[in-house]
């Protein structure tokens, strides 16, 4: 049996192969062993294997003497809100494989603050799981399992507080929402109704029977873009299965994408509430440009939601996120949140009386190229040093792998945690220049 992919914030695997109920319980037990007393929130994102894993975790944690609160289907950001709402010092577990294919599932761990657990806490969980140091104690009295519903109310309340609801309602926007049979449909539809929108919902039933590949990329949403035009919608919103990421389609059926989701939200928030912003080091420099425009501090973090949140807390950021369509607003929850992004974008459209196409077109324009390069892990350090020497005119940064910055472009090269490859991402004013940077990095690494 192959091993699941384990990180400091959770694990993922193919159900029945690298992820079984036994593996899930063992990992949850390792997490629980690091927690203080208190109920643990459990949710899942609607995948077909979710109920099986949810039942296994409920039973397994109960046998450890832990109290469990089972909320059933909920989006990942909603899980964060629920953990906050419960005010338990323990935290929670979301059963989700995010944008992975349907045969996958996983566990995402939440701290008592309602955020994905930071790296230090995650290292303890990984150590406990790998060392099998925390087996269930059959002599321990079983904990209580409580099952609750209507998990969404507080989350919607917080998201609505971000926007001028009456101003949005006056516009009566027509919106297409593609939840693709993930967890986002219920909250998304209710939120849009509260905002006075006429919503056309695709894949609203959270049964995990994805109508198209779950990652909201341009290729995967090719069948959705035309429906925005056919339904005469003002905007299309497309979520991933656990609804922490959002891609945008404009009123003309143009895929604006995930990088622009964060940038549009940053532009809108900084107009009204100037303050520090944070992105990870693989996100478009559009946000950095916007921070300069409004004269506010800009900070980069290492890749990973937990790292973005750490930096946001450290610097008191008013907004943060990642270029995968993940927007984090501390007024709601320190979790990437597609519902927050939807409300902020509609608020921007209503406040400035502009279509989303115009909001996107006024942003700084860059092109991104991404590639993979085969490289054994033992050669990674040598490879990064070679790149540093080769690109002498760039400003190097070793925050996460190697990032090389020029005045109008950048290149990031990072090693994979699971494969003998490195990932290269370049952004430049033109696609040709971004591709040239990736090609040149590939040539350098192949000589190592």
Image (cartoon, helix red, strand yellow):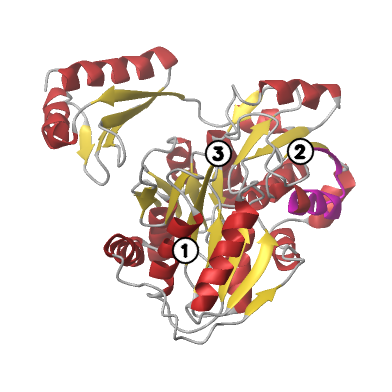
Asked which quadrant contains residue 355, the reply is: top right
- Assign the C terminus to one quadrant of the image: top left
Q: Determine whether, in the image, residue 213 is placed left or right of residue 160.
A: left
Above or below for 9 versus 354: below
Q: Label 1 to label 2, Cα distance in Å?
A: 30 Å
Coordinates of residue 181 in the picture (x, y in percent): 71, 41
> In the rendering, at what x and y percent does residue 372 appear?
33, 25
Q: Of the residues under marks 2 and 3, which one precedes in the sequence?
A: 3
User: Which class describes the residues within 10 Å of circle 2: few (<14), some (14-19), or many (20+)?
Assistant: many
C-alpha gap between disc 2 and disc 3: 18 Å
Q: Which residue is mark 1?
A: 25
Q: Which of the numbered marks, if any, corresponds to residue 203?
A: 2
- Label 3, secondary structure: give it: loop
Image-quadrant location for residue 308: bottom left
- Determine whether label 3 and label 1 are within 8 Å by CB: no
According to the image, label 3 marks what residue? 103
Give the magenta-colored segment's residue range: 187-203
User: For the residue labelled by badge 2, is the local secondary structure a helix, a strand or a loop?
Assistant: loop
Residue in the picture at 72% in, 71% down:
148
What's the distance in space between the residues labelled 3 and 1, CA to CA? 19 Å
Q: In front here: 408 or 112? A: 112
Q: Nearer the viewer, mark 2 or mark 3?
A: 3
Left or right of 55 on screen, residue 424: left
Tell me if I can see residue 425 in this picture: yes
Callout 2 touching callout 3 (CB < 8 Å) = no
Label 1 sits on a secondary structure element that is: helix
In the rendered image of this protein, does residue 5 appear above or below residue 273? above
| Residue that protrudes farthest toward the front in the picture | 138
Residue 375: within the magenta? no
């Amino acid at each position: 049996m192959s091993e699941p992919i384990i990180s400091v914030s959770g694990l993922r695997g193919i159900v029945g192969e690298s992820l079984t109920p036994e593996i899930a319980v063992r990992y949850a037990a390792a997490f629980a062993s690091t927690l203080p007393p208190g109920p643990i929130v459990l949710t899942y994102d609607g995948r077909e294997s979710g109920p099986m894993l949810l039942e296994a975790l409920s039973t397994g944690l109960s046998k450890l003497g832990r109290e469990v609160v089972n909320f059933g289907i909920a989006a990942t950001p909603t899980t964060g809100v629920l953990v906050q709402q419960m005010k338990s010092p323990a935290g929670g577990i979301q059963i989700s494989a995010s944008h992975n294919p349907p045969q996958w599932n996983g566990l995402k761990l939440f701290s008592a603050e309602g955020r994905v657990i930071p790296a230090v806490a995650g290292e303890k969980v990984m150590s406990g799981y790998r060392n099998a140091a925390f087996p269930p104690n059959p002599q321990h009295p079983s904990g209580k399992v409580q099952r609750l519903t209507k998990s969404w109310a507080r989350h919607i309340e917080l998201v609505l507080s971000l926007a001028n609801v009456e101003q949005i309602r006056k516009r009566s926007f027509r919106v297409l929402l593609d939840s693709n049979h993930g967890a986002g449909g219920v909250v998304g539809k209710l939120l849009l109704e509260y905002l006075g929108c006429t919503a056309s919902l695709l894949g609203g039933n959270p049964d995990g029977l994805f109508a198209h590949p779950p990652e909201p990329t341009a290729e995967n949403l090719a069948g959705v873009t035309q429906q925005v035009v056919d339904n005469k919608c003002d905007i299309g919103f497309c979520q991933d299965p656990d609804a922490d990421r959002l891609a945008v389609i404009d009123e003309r059926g143009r895929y604006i994408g995930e990088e622009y989701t964060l940038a549009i939200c940053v532009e809108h928030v900084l107009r009204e509430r100037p303050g520090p912003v944070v992105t990870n080091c693989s996100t478009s420099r559009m946000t950095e440009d916007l921070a300069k425009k409004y004269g506010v501090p800009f900070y980069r973090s290492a890749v990973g939601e937990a790292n973005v949140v750490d930096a946001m807390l450290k610097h008191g950021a008013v907004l943060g996120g990642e270029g995968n369509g993940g927007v984090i607003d501390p007024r709601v929850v320190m979790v990437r949140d597609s519902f927050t992004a939807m409300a902020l974008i509609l608020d921007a459209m209503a406040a400035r009386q502009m279509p989303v196409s115009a909001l996107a077109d006024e942003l700084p324009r860059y092109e991104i190229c991404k590639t993979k390069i085969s490289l054994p892990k033992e050669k990674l350090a040598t490879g990064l040093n070679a790149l540093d020497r080769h690109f002498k005119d760039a400003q190097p940064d070793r925050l996460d792998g190697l990032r090389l910055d020029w005045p109008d472009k950048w290149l990031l090269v990072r090693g994979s945690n699971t494969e003998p490859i490195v990932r290269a991402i370049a952004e430049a004013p033109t696609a040709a220049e971004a591709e040239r940077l990736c090609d040149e990095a590939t040539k350098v690494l192949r000589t190592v």
